[in-house]
Amino acid sequence: MAGRSNDDSNRDFFELVWEVVAQIPYGKVTTYGHIAAYLGARSSARTVGWAMKAAKGANLPCHRVVNRLGALSGKHNFEGPFVMEDRLRSEGVVFAEEDRVDLNKHLWIPGEDDQ
DNA sequence: AACGTGACTGCCC
DNA sequence: CGGGCAGCCACGT
């Protein structure tokens, strides 16, 4: 057994992602890439998407996570294809275009004191 | 163990 | 502005 516990790196990447998502402020959004970069895995943006999928059912604001273009790439993974957009609009999030959030106004980057 | 797929991203045409 | 290609990581078959 040897303890391999060395540090918090033992935690699953998914769990770290969920913690970041839980920190996204109300009315703000972030991207898969920024979350991955914040966790030191800039190339794992895709894995962040898997974490979201695995988080389905959890009490996480996963609707605040969009792709780099602000598009709701995961809307079809919610209870309905309209739930994600509906939830964002409820928080006052503005859409620059159809199915595309205005990141210029609502982008929140983990680690940045923007809260 | 190999292959295909995907809630991604960057680069090129 | 759209479409294709490559790199990346985890998962299902």
Image: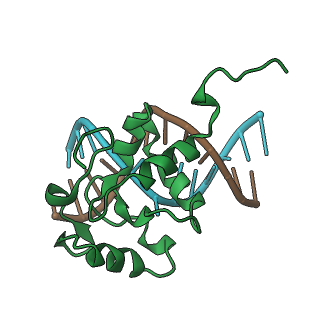
Chain colours: A green, B cyan, C brown
Furthest residue to the top? A2
Q: Picture coordinates of residue A5 (x, y %)?
A: 69, 23
Quadrant position of residue A6: top right
- In the rendered picture of this protein, how many numbered marks are placed on residues? 0
A65 versus A94 height, above or below = above
Where residue A8 appears, as percent x and y from the top left, is 59, 29
Q: Is residue B11 above or below residue C13?
A: above
Quadrant of the frame with the N terminus of chain A = top right
Q: Residue lying farthest right? A: A1
Please tell me which residue is depicted at 42% across the width and 40% down the height of the picture.
A36
Q: Residue at x 22, y 73 (%)?
A: A92
**Closest to the observer, A65 or B5:** A65
Q: Position of residue A57 (x, y in %)?
A: 59, 69
Q: Residue at x 41, y 79 (%)?
A: A83
In the shown orientation, is residue A83 left or right of residue C1? right
Q: Nearer the viewer, residue C6 or A23?
A: A23
Front residue (pair B7, A17): A17
Residue at left 39%, top 64%? A73
> As drawn, is A104 to the left or to the right of A2?
left
Q: Position of residue C2 (x, y in %)?
A: 24, 64
Left or right position of A46 against A12:
left
